[in-house]
Amino acid sequence: MIDINAMIERWKSGDERAAEALYHHFSESTFRLAYALLGNAADAEEAAQDALTYALVKIHRYDSERAAFGTWLHTITVSRCRDRQRRKRLARISLGEWLGWGRDLPDPAPGPESQVVQNETRHALLDAVQALSPSLREAIVLRYGAGHTFREIAEIMDCPAPTAQSRVRLAYKQLRQTLGAGTEPFGAPAPEGSPEAR
Amino acid sequence: MQKHAVEEDLIGYVHGTLTDAAREALDRHLAGCPACRAQLSDHQRAYRRLRETLRAEVAAAEAPQGMSYAAIAPQVHRRAGNRLGTSVDRLAPALASFAAVAGAFMAFLSLFRDVSWDPLGLAASASPTLPLGACFLFSIPALANARRSPLAHPREGWLRLLAVALWLGTAFVGLYEIAILREMVFRIAILWVDNTVQAQALALTLGNWGTFLLGAVWIAMVVGGGEFHYRNFGRRRSWQLFVWTILAELAVLVVAGVV
């Protein structure tokens, strides 16, 4: 179990081994957060690497009195994921296609590598999470997936704490509605006699 | 007929977002209402399953093998070699402290009437400039520590009040600026007009059409801006739009003063 604050101080002093230790400690959780937000491994890898690079290169901007390092890193990760989603939305249609010009322009959507990713087994709940609006998706992933408190979620999402709470509640309701139709474990109550019914 | 608990309260109970008073009231109701207890149990089961399943699905996602420290090591190495960032970080608190002390000293001096800049070789009285200098110096530590201030994280109610006040304020100023803009356009247009009759006709045309068009633009901006701020309340983009709106309105006032 590494001492995060000690690692940060050592890295601020210039010890690159401390930077590598921080990377190895946080890389998995950062990737998983990005994966839950973006829905595919390729984009999640890029977003996570961007976030980790920024956090380590700009370590002098981290204020330990304001938030834990993990929370700060997740704030950067959420920001990178938003940027990636924004670029994807804007790239969805090219100007030529919109104007109906003759030449077929290349599809800005996923290439071969992402096609392989799309063939991987998708999880029902993650699919439902991807269908949520961006703000609800972030709130539910940060709360359920990463286990952040509402105050930390408010800090990460740059919104008031009551707003973070209402987004989590609303996301929960929408997930139940989405998954409840035909997905027994989440929507309908457990049958009588089952352990969960007790 | 017994009144049942609101579903929103049950969901808030499960997520731990109810106030203490609301939770106690709901506990009292649940003690005597089996139907609501059953509904609460249902929500608690669903909450546990959703949370555990999402954590399990996210935990099952493994980082690709290409994601390694080696991929970012060159950028990190460059940062290790550049110590300028850490030097600035060490100096910043010292500069903020010096600015605070200097500002306090200037504020103290401004209490006296006969302070002058003679020691610095300037004949002018220092009294008018000392408060201004003190304000400027105090702003340095204030800005440096703004993120730590409780004012940086006000309650949501105050934020909503501020957002509504800003929206209404910019809307009223915008309404006033319709007249200003129309006047500006007219003053520029009459530079190309030869006589009074033409000027009067131009004034009438610009007055009618200008008011109509500017009014339509104003309505679109107020309604569209209001919806944008409602959807993005509390987020950085909403406050940024307020800042840009205020700056644009100030620019119109400045240009109108020049023209």
Image (cartoon, helix red, strand yellow):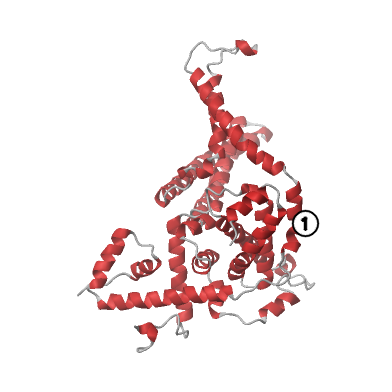
What amino acid is labelled 1 in the image? Pro
Camera-nearest residue between B29 and B48: B48
Which residue corresponds to the image point at 62% horizontal and 30% vertical from the top-left? B258
> Where, by quadrant of the figure, is residue B13 drawn?
bottom left
User: Quick one: SS at disc 1?
Assistant: helix
In this rendering, position of residue B209 left or right of residue B162: right
Q: Quadrant of the N terminus of chain B?
A: bottom left
Nearer-the-camera pick, B220 or B184: B220
Q: What residue is rendered at 30% in x and 62% in y? A: B22
x, y percentage for residue A110?
71, 73
Quarter of the picture containing the C terminus of chain B is top right
* Residue sticking out furthest to the left: B1
List the residue tagged with mark 1.
B74
Query: Does A144 appear above or below B239?
Result: below
Percent of width and height locating residue B21: 29, 59
**Which of the 4 image quarters holds residue B247?**
top right
Relative to B105, is A39 above or below? below
- Looking at the image, residue B240 lies above or below residue A164: above
Identity of the residue furthest to the right in this view: A103
Q: Is residue B23 left or right of residue B250?
A: left
The front one of B190 and B173 is B173
Residue B83's x, y, as percent? 72, 43
Q: What chain is tagged by disc 1?
A: B
Which is more toward the observer, B191 or A84?
A84
Category of crowding for the residue at label 1, using alpha-carbon neighbours closer than 10 angstroms: few (below 14), some (14–19), many (at least 20) = few
Q: Would you place residue B64 above or below residue A148 in this image?
A: below
Q: In the rendered image, is residue B197 in sight?
A: no
**Rendered residue at 58%/45% (across/down):** B244
Residue A52 appears anywhere in the view? yes
Using residue B82 as the reference point, say whether residue B217 is left or right of it: left
Q: Position of residue A8 (x, y in %)?
A: 62, 52
